[in-house]
Amino acid sequence: MADIDSNIDTSEVVENKDRKFGSQLHYYPCMIDDKPALFTEDSLIRATKRAARNPEDIPEDKSFWGSLFG
């Protein structure tokens, strides 16, 4: 498993309250360096596809057990 501490909980969804025509109905909120951020479903899909295309850029588990079993 990758050595990444941050997590976006996709079960936490907020409504786009002042929605403009054609904009997303909801967002996935999170904090980035103590600043709030809102992601659309499309931005999360693009990010997971990018990670799948570039697995070499994902931090490796550097723990003792991770080095033995990774």
Image (cartoon, rainbow, N blue to C red):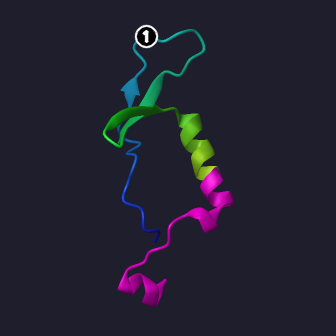
Q: Position of residue 47 (x, y in %)?
A: 58, 47
What is the residue that sits farthest to the left in this orientation? Answer: 34
Residue visible at 43% across and 19% down? 16
Looking at numbered disc 1 in the image, what kind of residue is underneath it? Answer: Asp
Residue visible at 62% across and 65% down? 55
Residue visible at 59% across and 43% down? 45
Does 49 appear above or below 33? below
As rendered, which of 8 and 36 lies closer to the eye?
A: 36
From the viewer's perspective, tell me whether residue 32 is left or right of residue 52: left
Q: Position of residue 62 (x, y in %)?
A: 42, 78
Does 40 appear above or below 16? below
What is the residue that sits farthest to the right in this orientation? Answer: 53
Dominant secondary structure, magenta: helix
As rendered, which of 13 and 53 lies closer to the eye?
A: 53
Does 37 appear above or below 25? below
What is the residue that sits farthest to the bottom in this orientation? Answer: 68
Quadrant assignment, res 4: bottom left
From the viewer's perspective, tell me whether residue 61 is left or right of residue 46: left
Region rendered in magenta: 50-70
Q: Position of residue 25 (x, y in %)?
A: 49, 21
SS at circle 1: loop
Quadrant assignment, res 61: bottom left
Is 56 magenta? The answer is yes
Question: How many numbered callouts?
Answer: 1
Q: Which residue is mark 1?
A: 18
Is 36 magenta? The answer is no
As rendered, which of 10 and 6 lies closer to the eye?
A: 6
Q: Residues within 10 Å of mark 1 (few under 14, many from 20)?
A: few
Residue visible at 53% across and 9% down? 20
From the viewer's perspective, tell me whether residue 15 is left or right of residue 55: left
